[in-house]
Amino acid sequence: MQTILILNSKGGCGKTTLATNLASLYATGGIETALMDHDPQESSLQWYSLRSEERAPIHVINANRTKSGLTRSWQLAVPPTTKRLIIDAPAGVKGAALQDLVRKTDVVIIPVAPSPIDIHATSGFIKDLLLVGKARSMGIQIGVVANRVRLNSPHYEPLHRFLNALKIPFITTLTDTENYIKAAEEGMGIHELPEEDSVFEREQWLPLIRWLDCPEAPTQVIPEFPKLSLVSGG
């Protein structure tokens, strides 16, 4: 089982959008998938409640609330046949909670919104992830995704330089389009929309899908977004 943690201490960066789209992508591909929601807002659970029974099944776990009569380990149990576990982490996680989440993870994806405030906060969070969370010393792969980006967004140069110095790959850019809203309203992911209607979004997801399949491989520049100068890293 590969465990993928969607994590950023800064709220509003689109963690749930990334988590639910990943879960639906794997499930639709016939891979047994579990989605664990640690966020107090329970946005991933709300997304799943809108999902049709005709769609590919996803095992969802509410990791935010404690159920009476159940131990914590039982509540968070993942079916033994699960091949992908996607974890939607809460905002503001730090210290022991951060360490606990990270140590159970194979891959950490950090979504970052394009505002200077978000970029600054994410840079600080990555320092905590490496120093407090000790992610790199545990051999965990870390990658950053520019999320909720509009076509006229500013440059990511400060974050670009910071990640390059730490050899953390900037994987891809996901543009904020109406298709994400359309899919979420029905508990779907972008890859469950008709292919002819979601070509643009699917192309943006390709570098992330390839990186998750082989995180050690170098990332690629996305030609549609030359201003972002995406970083190659190892």
Image (cartoon, rainbow, N blue to C red):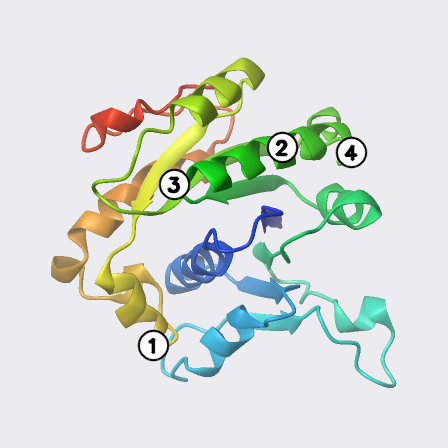
Total number of numbered discs in the rendering: 4
Q: Residues within 10 Å of mark 2 (few under 14, many from 20)?
A: few
Decide: is 15 above or below 113.
below
Name the side, left or right, on which 228 lies relative to 137: left
User: Which residue is rendered at x = 44% and y = 23% of the image?
Assistant: 158
Residue for badge 1: 185
Q: Residues within 10 Å of mark 1 (few under 14, many from 20)?
A: some
Which of 119 and 148 lies nearest the eye of the viewer? 119
x and y percent of residue 229 in the render? Answer: 31, 22
Which numbered mark, 1 or 3, is in the foreground of this view? 3
Q: Residues within 10 Å of mark 3 (few under 14, many from 20)?
A: some
Mark pair 4, 1: CA separation: 37 Å
Decide: is 225 above or below 30.
above
Mark pair 3, 2: CA separation: 15 Å
* Residue 132's disc number: 4
Which numbered mark, 4 or 2, is in the foreground of this view? 2
Residue for badge 3: 114
- Report the amino acid beneath label 2: Gly
Name the side, left or right, on which 22 lies relative to 75: left
Earlier sequence position, callout 3 versus callout 4 = 3
Image quarter for residue 172?
Answer: top left
User: Which residue is rendered at x = 49% and y = 57% of the image?
Assistant: 19
Label pair 4/2, CB-CB below 8 angstroms: no
- Report the amino acid beneath label 3: Pro
- Report the amino acid beneath label 1: Glu
* Residue 11's disc number: none
Mark pair 1, 3: CA separation: 24 Å
Secondary structure, mark 2, is helix
Which numbered mark, 1 or 2, is in the foreground of this view? 2
Which numbered mark, 3 or 4, is in the foreground of this view? 3
Residue for badge 2: 124
